[in-house]
Structure formats: C-alpha cells, structure tokens
Image (tube, grey):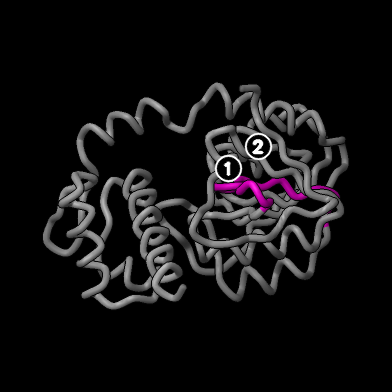
Amino acid sequence: MGTGIGRAKIDRRREEILHLLRSEGKVYISDLCTRFGTSPVTVRNDLDTLAEEGKLIRMTGGAVVLPAEQAKQADLIDRPEQKKEIALRAAGEIRDGDTLFINSGSTVELFAQALRDKKDLKIVTNSLRIATELGAIPTFHVILLGGMINAHSQFTFGENAQEQIIRFGADVAVLSVDGISEDGEITTCHAEEAIIDRLMIQRASRVLILADTAKIGRTGFSLVCHRGDKIEILTNKM
C-alpha cells in the first residue's frame, strides 16, 4: 500500500512539473525543489525520466518545453472563447455596489474586463493585472493585497496578504482555479496562492469558481478546498 501511495505522489509531482512547464516554457531545479520540498537528486530524476519519455528537453539546471508541446499550448491558450463565455456569465452575477474578492488567473482577468459597465464596486485582489485594470475606473474602489510577488503570474501572496484579507468581507469571491476533481476537490497549481484562495472563500458570502471544461475532472498540485454549499461552479458549454 505504501508503495502505491509513493508512486501516486511521484506521478502527481511529475504531472505538476509538466503543467508548470507548459505554462512557463521552462523550469529550474532549484525552484522545483522549493515548490515540492524535495531534494535536487529527486527533481533531477523526475526531469530525466520525463525527458526519456519524450515529454520535455533537459537543460543545465532544469528543463524546457518541447517545441511541439509549446505550439499545442499556444493553440489552446487558455481557450479564449470558452473563458470569455464564463467571464461574461460571472459578470452578469455581479450587482452595482457589490464588494468582491478576486484572485489571479486568465479567466478572472477576462471577468474583470467585463465589469467595466458596473458601478460602485469595492474590489480586493491579489492580482497585479486586475488591480491595474480596474483601478483606473473612477467608481471602483480597488485594494491590492500587499506581500511577496510571483513575478511570472503577477500575483501577491504570503503572510502580509493573508493578514490583510481577514480585515475584509465580500459579497462575492470570484476565483480562477486549475482543477475540480470528480469528488469536489478544488485545486490550484500555485501552492503559495492556495491559502489566499481559501481565505477569500471563507470571508465571502458567495463564491463563484470560474473553470472551463478542460479543468473539470482534473486535479492540480495544491488543494484549495472541497466544494461546499456556497460555492458555485461556472463553466462553459461542452
């Protein structure tokens, strides 16, 4: 039984490495060691095995995405039509004067753009892009959570951000995630953002999870929460 659990953990870690690689184009051993809490030897073994399986290209200190996979990912980038459909539906759920929590992600960025016709919104977000997008609207009051910065994905995280969230409550939390499993586990590939998402869910009266169909049935690296009564999943038509 222990062997089976260990194998599942390895497979899940390698799947997450591939997910990060597709998102970022390259990964570094030092960063992966920090993310997964593993040794350089373990990470090198993961990368070597994935390279032997033809899933990535090894380089000194890390790995890069396969050219074919990169092209495939660009073709799917983020399924813009499906995500726009979800974003517009979510925006339709927001009323003038609402207070919102919004995390980071491509779907919630489209959602933020769809809010421009609303009035008197109060928005608390850890997304630098969303804060910039909505902060320019005169009738919106936007608070960007301070803290450490994930420069690639443009969001803040850490103790400072967490301490700030608990000062606020929201009518609606609108969140992007990376996976919703069949048994209702809501997950993200960014372990450092998972606790931010969790606090937003706890502090909101209503939660909208925006996830296109490619994320349904998928499990990401870090658990955010299990689906509860106040959580609504908004996805696109098949």
**81 vs 70: above or below:** above
Residue named by callout 1? 217
Residue occupying the point 63% across, 32% down: 113
Q: Quadrant of residue 6?
A: bottom left
Q: Earlier in the sequence, mark 2 or mark 1?
A: 2
Residue 21 screen position, x and y as percent = 32, 49
Residue 17 screen position, x and y as percent = 34, 56
Residue 3 screen position, x and y as percent = 39, 72
Query: Can you say which quadrant of the picture contains the C terminus?
Result: top right
Residue 206's tag is none
Residue named by callout 2? 112
Query: What whole-number distance in Å separates the C-alpha atoms at marks 2 and 1?
Result: 26 Å
Q: Is residue 208 left or right of residue 106?
A: right
Nearer the observer, 150 or 71: 71
Residue 141 screen position, x and y as percent = 75, 48
Range covered by the magenta-colored residues:
170-184
Q: Quadrant of residue 61?
A: bottom left
Residue occupying the point 64% across, 27% down: 236
| Res. 167 visible in picture | yes
Q: Which kind of residue does numbered mark 2 sit on?
A: Ala
Q: Which kind of residue does numbered mark 1 sit on?
A: Gly
Nearer the observer, 6 or 155: 6
* SS assignment for the magenta stretch, majority: strand
Categorize mark 2 by other alpha carbons within 10 Å: few (<14), some (14-19), many (20+): many
Q: Is residue 139 left or right of residue 235?
A: right
Residue occupying the point 55% across, 40% down: 215
**7 vs 160: above or below:** above
Residue occupying the point 27% across, 35% down: 69
